[in-house]
């Protein structure tokens, strides 16, 4: 059924709903635990819409950390017939991969590296801290 199936939404509505999913996932997931989502890019009017990257940013904005990113090759792409003919006719490549971002809910609200302030003197002893 189409009801509740986000794949039937237009791109903006899909991303809006995925923000809700990311926030709720962050709320219910225990600290230190992970979640993953399999997502592929799409194409509109011969241009790639990078849904994978957009979704990663949504989850990062919700508070998750990106633990890993797997790029999965799609073996079931339709490379013959209709899609092959149209890819040549309209000059585009078939999207033959999906992303599997693996997110982790931080164990604590510890400050990030940028917020802690690195001691650059340990990394570059002669340079000291940057301005």
Image (spheres, rainbow, N blue to C red):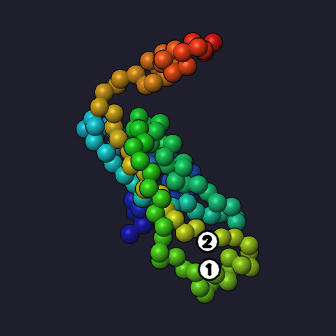
Q: SS for tag 2?
A: loop
Q: Quadrant of the C terminus?
A: top right
**Which residue is disc 1 drawn over?**
83
As drawn, 30 above or below 38 = above
- Residue in the picture at 37% in, 52% down: 36
The reply to whether residue 118 is in sight is yes
As drawn, 87 above or below 38 = below
Q: Which is more N-terminal, label 1 or label 2?
A: 1
- Residue in the picture at 51% in, 21% down: 123
User: Residue lying furthest bottom in this view?
Assistant: 81
**Which residue is disc 2 drawn over?**
94
* Label 2 crowd (10 A; few <14 / some 14-19 / many >=20): some
Q: SS for tag 1?
A: helix
From the top left corner, tell me how far across and down residue 24 is, in percent. 34, 42
CA–CA distance in space, label 2 to label 1:
8 Å
Front tag of 2 and 1: 2
């Amino acid at each position: 059924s189409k009801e509740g199936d986000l794949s039937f939404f237009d791109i903006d509505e899909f991303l809006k709903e995925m923000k809700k999913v990311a926030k709720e996932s962050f709320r219910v997931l225990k600290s230190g635990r992970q979640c993953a989502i399999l997502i592929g890019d799409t194409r509109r009017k011969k241009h790639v819409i990078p849904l994978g990257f957009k979704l990663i940013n949504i989850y990062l904005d919700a508070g998750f950390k990106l633990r890993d990113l797997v790029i999965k090759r799609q073996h079931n792409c339709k490379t013959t017939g209709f899609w092959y003919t149209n890819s040549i006719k309209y000059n585009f490549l078939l999207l033959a991969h999906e992303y599997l971002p693996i997110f982790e809910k931080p164990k604590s609200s510890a400050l990030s590296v940028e917020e802690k302030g690195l001691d650059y003197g340990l990394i570059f002893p002669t340079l000291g801290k940057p301005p």
